[in-house]
Amino acid sequence: MSLDLFTMATFEGIALYFYPLFFIASIVGGVVGSLSGGAGMITMPLLLVSGLNPLQALATNKLQACVGSFVSAAHYYHQGLVDMKESRTLMLIATFFGAMGAILVQFVEIALLSKILPFVMIAVGAYFLLSPNISDKDRAKNPHKIFLFISIVVAGLYGGFLGIGIGSFVLALLVSIGGYGLSKALAHSRWVVFSINISSTLFFILGGNVLWILGIIMCVGQSIGASLGARLAIKHGARIIRPIVICVCFVLSTQLLIKEFF
């Protein structure tokens, strides 16, 4: 196939040359997502640039994010960093409200949320940057569970509705409200994010918005990246997790501010 033909040919409405780019982006997104959340920062802009409509881009991104969050969550579980009894209620809340968010996004205008989101990510990044107490040590033996449950309701709705930066958001909630140490919070956050992703992905599939071939290619990339990222997090703990979360939050907020206001 000549270069001109390759650049002009399309599949699923997308130029063929985007497919290797999507594969690479999903690997990078998998690494970033398993360390801090924020994989959508890597993959969503590329999906939109390729010419997909926002709903197709969001649905396909959810499919590959679902696989990536599960792969990294499974790694953390096998390393003994997750108590499933402790996370069960959070996962049930996240599953239900993630589904609600996925239903809402197919009928509601998301422009206002898109304008608020960069400021939320700035706040999350500032929390991880300025808080002196963030480490791998748990800070609260008896966290305020009601406040934590309410915060996961909000996270579930947002995660199913839009979901960009949801991993960093849930991580911040588990550290600040749940009192988890950073490594434990990251491990538990991946199960909460997976719960949001699996329920919202099912509704996007039912809505017929997922591009399957592209989604499967990106799922493979996410699996590779999420596995690498989880191994890094398990090996280095808070030393690598905290700076990456801070960088992801500020890069994502800058990207969103430029997109929404400039």
Image (cartoon, rainbow, N blue to C red):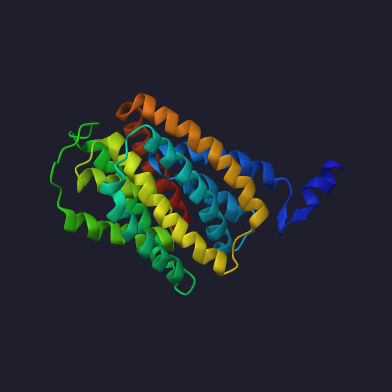
Q: Position of residue 203 (x, y in %)?
A: 50, 66
Q: Of 261 and 101, which appears nearest the observer?
A: 101
In the image, is 147 to the left or to the right of 182? left
Q: Residue at x 40, y 44 (%)?
A: 37
The relative height of residue 178 versus residue 200 in the rendered view (above or below) is: above
Q: Residue furthest right?
A: 2
Q: Position of residue 45 (x, y in %)?
A: 54, 51
Q: Residue at x 50, y 40 (%)?
A: 30
Q: Residue at x 49, y 71 (%)?
A: 106
Q: Residue at x 14, y 41 (%)?
A: 140
In the image, is 19 to the left or to the right of 178? right
Q: Position of residue 49 (x, y in %)?
A: 61, 53
Quadrant housing the N terminus: top right
Q: Residue furthest front?
A: 85
Q: Of 255 and 163, which appears nearest the observer?
A: 163
Q: Is residue 165 visible?
A: no
Q: Is residue 218 visible?
A: yes
Q: Position of residue 14 (x, y in %)?
A: 70, 55
Q: Residue furthest top?
A: 235
The relative height of residue 183 versus residue 39 in the rendered view (above or below) is: above
Give the quadrant of residue 247. top left
